[in-house]
Amino acid sequence: MSERTLVLVKPDGVRRAIVGEVISRIERKGLKLVALELKNLPRETAESHYAEHSGKPFFGELVDFITGGPLVALVVEGPRAIEAFRALAGATDPVKAAPGTIRGDFALEIGENIVHGSDSPESAEREIKLFFPEVA
Ligand code: CMP
């Protein structure tokens, strides 16, 4: 059975010009692109997207970072797409992420870890609605 996940290439990924590299890895894995947009995230959308982290000490920094430049949002589809993309992304802390994963190959800092992928079917549904109301 197919499922969908929301993927973000965060502003650090756009700045470093590895959007194509990330999309290429998604496509090579066999996942399908369903929606794609380059956009500047309004602060309100960022706060809503990261609502579950709103009490954490790094929340302000996280919202500043994700709204600090254009990002690329994608809806990706395939069998177990949520887990499949999280495996491609690697661990949240890029130093712990295995080489061969996106974060393992391209990042060093937890706050600038190149990509985001939904972590559950419930998050995926909420995040896809937030970024692509017309697709959900
Ligand atoms: P992401 O998958 O986008 O979901 C929440 C983000 O918060 C996570 O990736 C990290 O980039 C960020 N994050 C998690 N822990 C920390 C931290 N201790 N300091 C800064 N950012 C963090």
Image: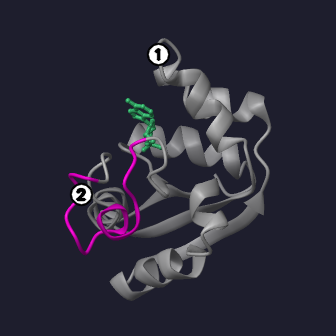
Q: What amino acid does circle 2 point to?
A: Ala
Which residue is painted at 76% across and 28% down in the image? 44
Which SS class for mark 2?
Answer: loop
The residue where tag 1 is placed is 57
Q: Tell me if residue 90 comes above or below residue 64 in the rendering.
A: below
- The quarter of the displayed image where residue 65 is located: top right
In the picture, which quadrant includes the N terminus?
bottom left
Instruction: First in sequence, mark 2 or 1: give its number.
Output: 1
**Residue 126 in the image: x percent, y percent?**
55, 38
Q: Nearer the viewer, residue 114 or 119?
A: 114
Which residue is painted at 43% across and 37% down in the image? 122
Q: Which residues are magenta?
A: 95-110
**Residue 10 in the image: x percent, y percent?**
59, 55
The residue where tag 2 is placed is 97
Ligand 1 falls in which quarter? Answer: top left
Q: Nearer the viewer, residue 22 or 108?
A: 108
Which SS class for mark 1?
Answer: loop
Q: Tell me if residue 88 comes above or below residue 39 in the rendering.
A: below
Q: What amino acid does circle 1 point to?
A: Pro
**Disc 2: CA contacts within 10 A as few (<14), some (14-19) or many (>=20):** many
Residue found at the very far top of the displayed protein:
55
Q: Is residue 106 magenta?
A: yes
- The quarter of the displayed image where residue 47 is located: top right
